[in-house]
Structure formats: C-alpha cells, structure tokens
C-alpha cells in the first residue's frame, strides 16, 4: 500500500499511541482510510515522512486548532472546522500540532501518488515528462471533497461486501477532484471547462490577497471587486465557486482565524487582538469566540499556552 517509511495508519497509531476508531482498506489494497478520535484539553503531535502517498485530513466531528509544519518550516496555524481539508503532499515531511476544547474526530485518507499521477496521464492532462504536485488548501472548504469524505465515513460505519470496492472508486473520485482544484495543473484547459470558476483563478487570488492585506479594515464589496478588476456580481460568483463562501463570510472567517493565531502570543492584549483583526472591540471578539468555541478569548489563550 505504501513504503515502509510512509505515514500509514500503522505509523499514526504508533505516533499517537492509540488505535483508530475505525479503518478500512480498499479492495486493491492500495488505499486506506481511518478515523482518529481525540480528547479535549491535550495537545497532540503527529509527524513522519510521506514519500509515496498523500494524506488528506479533515475533521468530521468538532473542530480544533491546527499548526502545520512542512520540512521543518511552519506553513500555517489556524482553526480547522469540520470538513475543512488539509493535505500532506507526497514528498513532504509533515509535523502537526493540534488541540481542541471538545472531543473531535479526524478522517485520514491515505492516497498513493501513483493513483493521482496515473489518472492525470490517463486523462491526457499532462505531458509524459511533466510531474504532478498536489497543493495543500490549508483548511479551505471544498464541497466536493466533503461529499467524498462523508461517503468514506459511511462505508466505514456500515461496511458490506461492496465497501472495500467502493473505497477504490471514492479514491479515484478524490484524486480527480484534487487534480482539478488543488494541483499544479488545476489551471489546465483540460481540467477547467470554459465558464467554470477555478479556485486558482488569478482574479480570485487578487481578491483574496486584497482581503488578507485589509482584514482589519471595513472593506466593502465594491472595493474588493475594484482590486480584482471585476463586477460585484462576478466577484461574488467567483468567490462562491472558488472558496465555497461569499466574500463577507470569508472575511469574517479569516478575522476569526487570525485572532486565534494572535491569541497564542501572550504579549498581545485581547483588546489589541480585536483591533488588529477587524473586530469592533474586545466585547465583539469575545462574542464571536464564545459562539464558535464555547469559551472566551482568555480561556482559549490559557488552553493554548497551557
């Protein structure tokens, strides 16, 4: 299924010190999936090289704060809500730190790179000499990936004689989705039909970059649209198709995620975190954090630094 050094379910079991809640291996023996349940109040660490496969990870119950390192460098740190995916790409040496205030369950799908590459060549989407690289969406939401993940969970929960064959089929569907939306060939004309917004559309990238640079400001739709050279209608459509969210909801989520990141720094006051992340005041920040995490910013900071 994978090389002996890969981050397989067996390696995760050894790394974490406990077995998965459920697991399944495909009929061909090439793909596997596992559900891992974590208790609140602890910080978990998971690391290990992935040489011949990709690990797709998404919480299916609850949410947690996830800090991700690749090859020794921190890539991102943010809250990971249910069915928001991150991807450990083949060839990386990952290290993840994650903690939650409530019990949470995470799905791992262990997908061989050979399947991804084989499908790309079978579709004639790449030249024989071109390599395929999958790109971590960094906790972004993809409704197609969510649908596949939910079906994988159902196959594990209610296995029958078809479940292992179904996992092979779901792995192929997942690989195709990742090629279309989360790879170095996602802009290929073969994979992006005319009239379909692509998550990596350069205009969407402009809009997102503008929002990230002005996350603490009162940014209007017209201002974002102007920055990307789009009409408001086109901007909204592009955002929904590319991120699964309208611009305003994306901005609110990023403000919350940035606030969670800044709360990890005890030198920054709660009031300053609120101001720097675009909240009206510390009370507004407290309301949002309590609604999403069922705790105050002070309690969240205490848990992070414990």
Image (tube, rainbow, N blue to C red):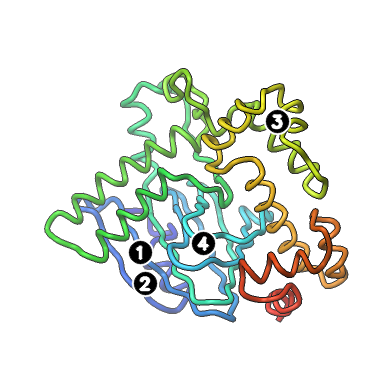
Q: From mark 3 to mark 2, how far is it between C-alphas?
A: 41 Å
- Which residue is under mark 3? 206
- Which of the marked residues, 4 or 3, is nearer the chain's N terminus? 4
Distance from Cα at disc 2 to Cα at disc 4 = 17 Å
Q: Residues within 10 Å of mark 2 (few under 14, many from 20)?
A: many
Q: Are marks 1 and 2 in contact (CB under 8 Å)?
A: yes
Say few, some or many: other residues with alpha carbon within 10 Å of mark 1 (under 14 / 14 to 19 / 20 or more): many
- Distance between the alpha carbons at the discs numbered 1 and 3: 37 Å
Question: 93 or 270: nearer the eye?
Answer: 270
Give the residue pinned by disc 1: 34
- Give yes or no for contact between labels 1 and 3 (Cβ–Cβ under 8 Å): no
Circle 2 sits on which residue? Answer: 20
Residue 239: percent from the left, percent from the top?
Answer: 59, 35
Q: Is residue 11 left or right of residue 198?
A: left
Neighbours of disc 3 within 10 Å: few (<14), some (14-19), many (20+): some
| Residue holding disc 4 | 48
Q: Residue at x 26, y 51 (%)?
A: 167
Of the residues under marks 1 and 2, which one precedes in the sequence? 2
Cα distance, mark 1 to mark 2?
6 Å
Q: Nearer the viewer, residue 84 or 107?
A: 84
Residue 14 image point, x, y percent: 43, 74
- 233 and 67: which is toward the camera: 233
Q: Is residue 98 above or below residue 134?
A: below
Q: Is residue 44 left or right of residue 126?
A: right
Relative depth, front residue between 138 and 55:
138
**Are discs 2 and 4 less than 8 Å apart at CB?**
no
Q: Quadrant of residue 67?
A: bottom right
**Mark 1 or 3, closer to the camera:** 3
Q: Position of residue 255 (x, y in %)?
A: 72, 54
């Amino acid at each position: 299924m994978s090389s002996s050094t890969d981050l397989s379910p067996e390696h995760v079991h050894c790394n974490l010190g406990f077995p998965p809640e459920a697991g399944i291996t495909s009929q061909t023996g090439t793909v596997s999936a596992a559900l891992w349940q974590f208790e609140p109040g602890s910080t978990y660490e998971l690391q290990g090289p992935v040489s011949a496969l990709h690990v797709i990870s998404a919480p299916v119950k609850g949410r947690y704060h996830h800090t991700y390192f690749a090859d020794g460098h921190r890539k991102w740190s943010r809250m990971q809500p249910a069915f928001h995916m991150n991807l450990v790409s083949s060839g990386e040496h990952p290290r993840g730190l994650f903690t939650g205030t409530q019990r949470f369950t995470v799905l791992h799908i262990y997908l061989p790179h050979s399947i991804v590459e084989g499908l790309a060549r079978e579709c004639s989407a790449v030249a024989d000499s071109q390599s395929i690289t999958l790109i971590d969406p960094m906790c972004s939401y993809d409704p197609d990936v969510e649908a596949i993940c939910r079906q994988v969970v159902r196959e594990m929960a209610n296995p029958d004689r078809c479940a292992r064959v179904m996992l092979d089929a779901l792995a192929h569907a997942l690989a195709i989705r990742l090629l279309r939306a989360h790879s170095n060939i996602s802009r290929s004309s073969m994979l992006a039909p005319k009239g379909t917004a692509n998550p990596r559309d350069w205009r969407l990238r402009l809009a997102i970059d503008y929002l990230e640079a002005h996350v603490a400001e009162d940014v209007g739709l017209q201002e974002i649209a102007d920055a990307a050279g789009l009409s408001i209608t086109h901007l909204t459509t592009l955002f929904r198709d590319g991120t699964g969210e309208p611009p305003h909801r994306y901005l609110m989520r990023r403000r919350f995620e940035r606030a969670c990141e800044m709360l990890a720094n005890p030198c920054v006051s709660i009031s300053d975190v609120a101001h720097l992340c675009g909240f009206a005041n510390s009370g507004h920040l407290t309301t949002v954090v309590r609604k999403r995490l069922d705790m105050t910013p002070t309690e969240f900071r205490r848990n992070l630094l414990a």
